[in-house]
Amino acid sequence: MLTALHQKKGLQLVLGLTAGLFFGFFLQKGGVTQYDVILGQLLLKDFTVVKIMLSAVITGMLGVHLMRSLKLIRLHPKPGSWATAVWGGIFFGIGFAVLGYCPGTIAGAVGNGFLDAAVGGLAGIVAGAGLFASIYGKIQKPVLSRGDFGEKTLSDLFHVNAWAVVLPAALILVLILVLLEKAGL
């Protein structure tokens, strides 16, 4: 099944688009495409965004590893480094703070017809991606490769089965969700 899917690029695109539409629909239904909700999160007054994203992480993490265990998919971790994580976080944070959207919520807000997301968000994504692509060759070795840790996952790092990381992580995230709810956040 996995090999057959790899040979059908069109089907992969349709599956990806379908998953993206569902994700955007749920972001919109959860209210996180609303600027006021995102602003409330940034001000630590409304934790709707955190709760929805933690729910998505838990669902995705368990789903991906279940499919991996059933040999329906293979994981291909990309090489990483501390520098890419730090610089990516800085630029993501700047864009999030300035516009009030992340890439997922920009797509959902565009679907809602919000002009700020369509003009500022999409323009920012395209401009940022273009700028990054144009300078990548110059910054890849001297800047982005610092603290390189390769293609390791947490289970590789700890030398354990992936489920030994996934299940405790999912339980911790569920506990965080419960605590946020009990705190009324």
Image: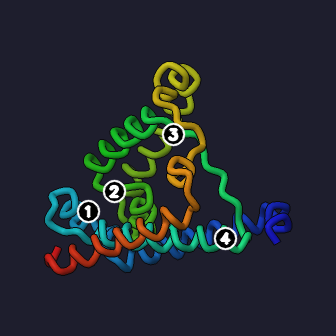
Q: Position of residue 53 (x, y in %)?
A: 38, 67
Q: Position of residue 124 (x, y in %)?
A: 41, 44
Q: Amino acid at mark 1?
A: Ile
- Tag 3: Cα neighbours inside 10 Å, few (<14), some, or many (≥20)? few
Q: CA distance from mark 2 to mark 4?
A: 34 Å
Q: Amino acid at mark 3?
A: Ala
Q: Position of residue 25 (x, y in %)?
A: 46, 76
As drawn, is 142 to the left or to the right of 102? right
Q: CA distance from mark 4 to mark 1?
A: 36 Å
Q: Indicate which disc residue 69 carries.
A: 4
Q: Amino acid at mark 2?
A: Tyr
As drawn, is 174 to the left or to the right of 61? left
Q: CA distance from mark 1 to mark 2?
A: 7 Å
Q: Secondary structure at mark 2?
A: loop
* 22 vs 145: above or below: below
**Of callouts 2 and 4, the N-terminal one:** 4
Q: Indicate which disc residue 85 carries.
A: none
Q: Please give the residue where the numbered disc 1 appears in the rendered image.
A: 38
Q: Residue furthest front?
A: 159
Colour mode? Answer: rainbow
Q: CA distance from mark 1 to mark 3?
A: 23 Å
Q: Is residue 52 visible?
A: no
Q: Quadrant of residue 93?
A: top left
Q: Please give the residue where the numbered disc 3 appears in the rendered image.
A: 129
Q: Amino acid at mark 4?
A: Ser
